[in-house]
Image (spheres, rainbow, N blue to C red):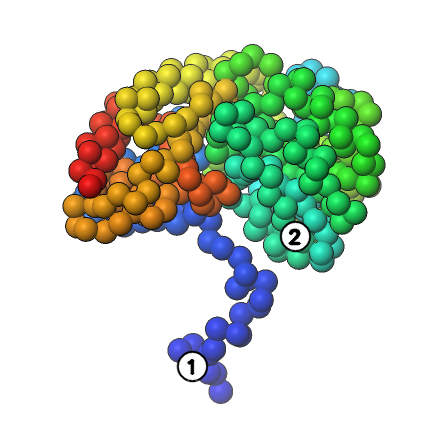
Amino acid sequence: MSVPTATLAPSFLSDRINAMQESQTIAMAKKARELAAQGIDVINLSFGEPDFETPQYIRDAAKVAMDEGYTKYTPVPGYLDLRQAIVEKLHRENQLEYKAENIVVSTGAKQALANAVMSLINAGDEVIVFAPYWVSYEEMVKLAEGTSVTLMGALENDYKVTAAQLEAAITPRTKLIMYSSPCNPTGSVFSRAELGEIAAVVARNPQLHVIADEIYEYINFVGEHVSLAQFAEIKEQVITINGFSKGYAMTGWRVGYMAARKEIAAACEKMQSQITSGTCSVAQRAALAALQGGRTSADEMVAAYRRRRDLVLTQVRDIPGFKTPTPSGAFYIFPDVSAYFGRTTPAGDTLATASDLALFLLNDAHVAAVTGEAFGAPNCIRFSTAAADEKLREAFVRIKASLEKLG
């Protein structure tokens, strides 16, 4: 006899899932959609998704793939020709030497990250997470029963963690470091010199591994993208994560990959084999076409992102109390908004946190953004600039008007 759902206690769910938090980016996007469904004109700057269509040549390759019979199960680590194309890309663009056996293609870069964390971390292991960080890092560590150790980069240093901070945080229990560059949510980009100093710390601690999340590699406004694995003395300690969602506007295709030494790649393949197995066949053929087609479409999108960044910065710097450095990459701005904490809304509510302010802006300005608390930076709010110029202009006009209503 089945038990009615309403009579089940919360404990019927695992401690693992009860401990996890819902993605705040997804949660805010959901609230924005709910308001939009009521007929309200909401400008959604909460989601980290390019507003461009996947380039036509990539879509055409997917259609051809279906006609050619690419509709069956795929090898767990990905089609060999795709992995070989990734090897060639890493050699050509990142000066990294790998073989196909070092590459695992996954259902999005998020799965590649999760595979690596789950394959490396035991209960109680410490994982140093550079903050502000992408929302899922800490939840992945939690899922693996590890302990996150958050290092916060200073706003004055473009939110970038220093090598000195890293060295001071390492303990005998530290096993892994996680960071992104270009960074989600800040847009910060580590320079060659800064990564060289970090590499020197890692080299002195051979028990450590580093997950270098490079998913925003192509959306870079400073010219040079540096991969941590380029530092030869620590290459075997580095797991490079990348994918196609941002640079090629292929979010829904769900194709990511990792490059790591053979033992780690094999472990991640084993993990993936028991969860999803191989990535979608048609999506992989599209990803192969993306690599073969070069970076022209990506560079065109980056030019638009740079223009939008500059547009938004001009408006944000006209808003009293918003403090933000100039993002060097990605498509976000991440202002410190703590000057508004303690202010009161027209309804008499006190804004105590960035979450309160983000919710006020959603309900009053009808602009959706994500609280910095989700990124380990409780004084900030993340705004995506992956939207049309006119939407961005209107959004920050609304935001400024709403903030002027606060007491």
Residue 144 is situated, as x and y percent measured from the top left of the image, at: 66, 54
Residue 180: quadrant of the picture: top right
Q: What is the three-letter code of the residue carrying label 1?
A: Thr
Residue 85 sits in which quadrant? Answer: top right
Image height check: is 243 above or below 24?
Answer: above
**According to the image, label 1 marks what residue?**
7
Gap in Å between the C-alphas at discs 1 and 2? 34 Å
Q: Is residue 19 above or below residue 297?
A: below
Residue 330, image x, y percentages: 48, 26
Name the residue rendered at 22%, 27% in the picture: 397
According to the image, label 2 marks what residue?
147
Residue type at the position of mark 2 = Thr
Q: Nearer the viewer, residue 73 or 124?
A: 124
Secondary structure beneath dot 1 equals helix
Asked whether disc 1 touches disc 2, contact meaning CB atoms under 8 Å apart, the reply is: no
Residue 52 in the image: state x and y as whole percent: 40, 26
Residue depth check, mark 1 versus mark 2: number of the one nearer the observer = 2
Residue at 40% over, 31% down:
335
Can I make out residue 135 in this image? yes
Q: In which quarter of the image is the C terminus?
A: top left
Judged from this view, the residue extending furthest toward the bottom is: 1
Which of marks 2 and 1 precedes in the sequence? 1
388, 56: nearer the viewer: 388
192 or 345: nearer the eye?
Answer: 345
Circle 1: is it few (<14), some (14-19), or many (20+) Cα within 10 Å? few
Label 2 sits on a secondary structure element that is strand
